[in-house]
Image: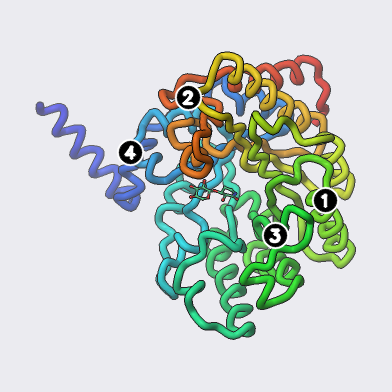
Amino acid sequence: MKTTNFGRVLAALVVAALAIPLDSAQLAFSRGVSEREDSLSHEAHKLGIRIGSAVSSSALSIDTTYAQILGEQFSAITPENEMKWAFVEPQQGVFNFGPADNEVLFAHQYGQLVRGHNLVWHSQLPSWLLRGSFTNEQLADLLKHHIFAEAGHFRGKIWQWDVVNEPFNEDGTLRPSIWFNALGPNYIADALVWTHLADPHAKLYLNDSNIEGLGPKSDAMYALVKNLLAAHVPIDGVGFETHLALQFGLPPMIQQNLQRFADLGLEVSITEMDVRMVLPATPDSLARQASVYAQLMQDCIAVRNCVDFTVWEYTDKYSWIPGFFKGQGSADIYDENFNPKPAYAALLDALENAVSHRHHGK
Ligand code: XIL
């Protein structure tokens, strides 16, 4: 009893002395765990690749197992929602950076890098912005100020910013979003320039879905980044979301596609990978899922500029899939009880094989 009280008092003193805000001091990770030798990140490090996961700040604050595995296995994180506009500025001029700050704090405690996600998107916008009646000039101004406020807030703490998220339609035309409609196609270049001014050291990315293989959408992204480079607009990389579905199979020519972007001198990153399936999962579907994950890892390893391989939540416990794709799930590399699935072993195998063959040379 005495010892417990003493411990509590000591902990309170330490917290007070370090002036850690109470909400971050209470996070599940506060006891600290170091990276394990048999981890995904440990193997990937030998190849110059970061292994990331999307992270939920609410899970991080209540689920110690979630936080522990995140700290042990991964070398990068992406806030899954907490840096999106609707979260950081729910009312005009009222900022809420706390949850994302906690995630950044967690990352720094574990030597992880942070992917900022995202600054400009058509989705998860606050309703004051969607419902307001703003002129085009006002919208341009709002976007610029948003980028300066957010990228400025996290200045120096972000490895890669998804500056513009999902700019394309499936056919490769630009998506007619609030930003496209107000600023025209140049909103992308403007956003990149503003972000560079707000945080000169962050790597600036365009991120999109369904651009992993060759096709009209990846052709459009390729043409866009080529033009941006020619115009000396600051851009460092392209993010390939890689939300795959077992029933649709692999997109065509992934490695060749990643390579053509890398050949422009850009980084490429797998930014949101998951492989959903029609439920229930079976040993056979889990084995096929494992080989899809392994294939993508092999493609990333084979492309010298592939610097990051991030999964969109590592555990089925917090996957977005069941809520968005009816009857589908089991998309992640750990199950709902934090048991590693065959996909986890397949990723580790792919990394270990590459290390032992020294193919990568990064
Ligand atoms: C998803 C999140 O996972 C969900 O929690 C949220 O409700 C909706 O957004 N492409 C993206 C991500 O770039 O931001 C999306 O994340 C998934 C698709």
Left or right: 83 as drawn, with respect to 99: right
Distance between the Cα atoms at labels 1 and 4?
A: 43 Å
Quadrant occupied by the N terminus: top left
Q: Which mark is residue 62?
A: 4
Residue tagged by mark 3? Answer: 167
Quadrant occupied by the C terminus: top right
Name the residue rendered at 58%, 32% in the picture. 276
Where residue 294 appears, as percent x and y from the top left, is 70, 24
Sequence-wise first label, 2 or 3: 3
Classify mark 3: helix, strand or loop.
loop
Callout 1–callout 2 Cβ contact below 8 Å: no
Where residue 41 appears, as percent x and y from the top left, is 61, 28
Q: Amino acid at mark 2?
A: Asp
Callout 1–callout 3 Cβ contact below 8 Å: no
Where residue 147 appears, as percent x and y from the top left, is 59, 68
Sequence-wise first label, 4 or 2: 4
Residue tagged by mark 2? Answer: 335
Residue lying furthest left: 1
Distance between the Cα atoms at labels 2 and 3?
A: 32 Å
Left or right: 289 as drawn, with respect to 87: right
Name the residue rendered at 49%, 30% in the picture. 315
Q: Nearer the viewer, mark 1 or mark 2?
A: 1
Left or right: 11 as drawn, with respect to 269: left
Disc count in the image?
A: 4
Sequence-wise first label, 4 or 3: 4
Q: Nearer the viewer, mark 4 or mark 2?
A: 2
Residue tagged by mark 1? Answer: 216
